[in-house]
């Protein structure tokens, strides 16, 4: 079964340990829906710059967690191929004396709420007071060296913990509902999860679209934590997320 060459070329950004599995996953997609990948290859989609499989840069043997969001950010500069890692974000903290998180972080709602969740889990913020003066005080300490400074450092910390940062749909298309694209990628995810099963990684599923992966038998049998998507304000106070991420100290310098 032929996979379109633009899709195959995107495999170059994945770690070599993943290539046989990703090819098998693409073949499973093609078998389930022969028209999907050719149509995708001829369409405009995010992420650009051949970053479709950029999340698979972590060697397969090092995966301890599979974090699944919904889909790429709907902005070309933001969609990196890595779940909730917004390419438009550099610094995490505002440079203003009375500022909190940086403007690009505040624009990326999921990332903003993830940051606040980490700060609540770390005891730096109260879950009912995550803005204004309280957040400005946290940012002031961070700028003085009390926390990591950039999103790149955050991504590196997550990678060190063994996170594979995926989305339920690896693409965003303005004219296609995310749930439809996510449905087409289900055979791909089934292949990926089956390949990881001997390592027994923990699945972290964010949002209703990611939760649909539980329809797959291989996913249903894996240890997992299900939470609302981080674009919901309630995510900040999610105790399961506090228990998972708090001990990792992702913001520590």
Image: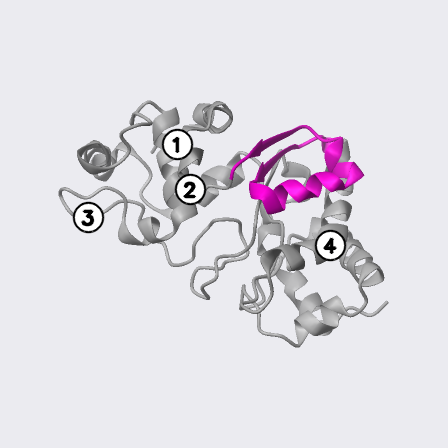
Of mark 4 and mark 3, the one earlier in the sequence is 4
Reply yes or no: does residue 213 show up in magenta: yes
Count neighbours of disc 3 (C-alpha within 10 A) and say few if under 14, some if 14 to 19, many if 20 or more. Answer: some
Q: Nearer the viewer, residue 40 or 22?
A: 40
Q: What secondary structure is marked by label 2?
A: helix
Per the image, the residue denoted by label 4 is 22
User: Do labels 4 and 1 touch, CB within 8 Å?
Assistant: no
Left or right, 86 with respect to 140, comes to right
Per the image, the residue denoted by label 3 is 95
Report the Cα–Cα distance between label 1 and label 2.
11 Å
Q: Residue furthest bottom?
A: 42
At x 65%, y 59%, the residue is 181
Magenta span: 199-228
Q: What secondary structure is marked by label 1?
A: helix
Of mark 1 and mark 2, the one earlier in the sequence is 1
Per the image, the residue denoted by label 2 is 154
Report the Cα–Cα distance between label 2 and label 3.
18 Å
Of mark 4 and mark 1, the one earlier in the sequence is 4
Of mark 1 and mark 3, the one earlier in the sequence is 3
At x 80%, y 55%, the residue is 24
């Amino acid at each position: 079964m032929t996979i379109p060459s633009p899709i195959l070329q995107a495999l170059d950004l994945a770690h070599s340990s993943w290539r046989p599995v990703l090819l098998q996953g693409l073949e499973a997609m093609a078998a389930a829906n022969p028209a999907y990948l050719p149509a995708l290859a001829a369409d405009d989609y995010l992420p650009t710059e051949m970053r479709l499989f950029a999340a698979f840069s972590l060697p397969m043997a090092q995966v301890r967690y599979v974090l699944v969001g919904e889909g790429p950010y709907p902005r070309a500069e933001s969609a990196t191929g890595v779940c909730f890692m917004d390419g438009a974000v550099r610094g995490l903290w505002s440079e203003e004396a009375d500022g909190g998180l940086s403007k690009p972080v505040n624009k990326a709602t999921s990332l903003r709420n993830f940051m606040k969740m980490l700060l609540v889990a770390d005891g730096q913020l109260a879950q009912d007071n995550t803005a204004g003066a309280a957040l400005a005080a946290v940012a002031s300490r961070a700028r003085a060296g009390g926390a990591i400074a950039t999103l790149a450092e955050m991504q590196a910390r997550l990678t060190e913990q063994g996170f594979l940062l995926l989305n339920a749909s690896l693409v965003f298309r303005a004219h296609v509902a995310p749930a439809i694209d996510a449905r087409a990628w289900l055979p791909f995810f089934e292949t990926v999860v089956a390949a990881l099963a001997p390592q027994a990684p923990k699945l972290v599923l964010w949002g209703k679209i990611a939760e649909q992966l539980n329809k797959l038998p291989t996913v249903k049998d894996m240890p997992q934590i299900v939470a609302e998507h981080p674009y919901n304000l309630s995510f900040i106070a999610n105790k399961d997320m506090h228990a998972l991420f708090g001990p990792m100290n992702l913001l520590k310098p």
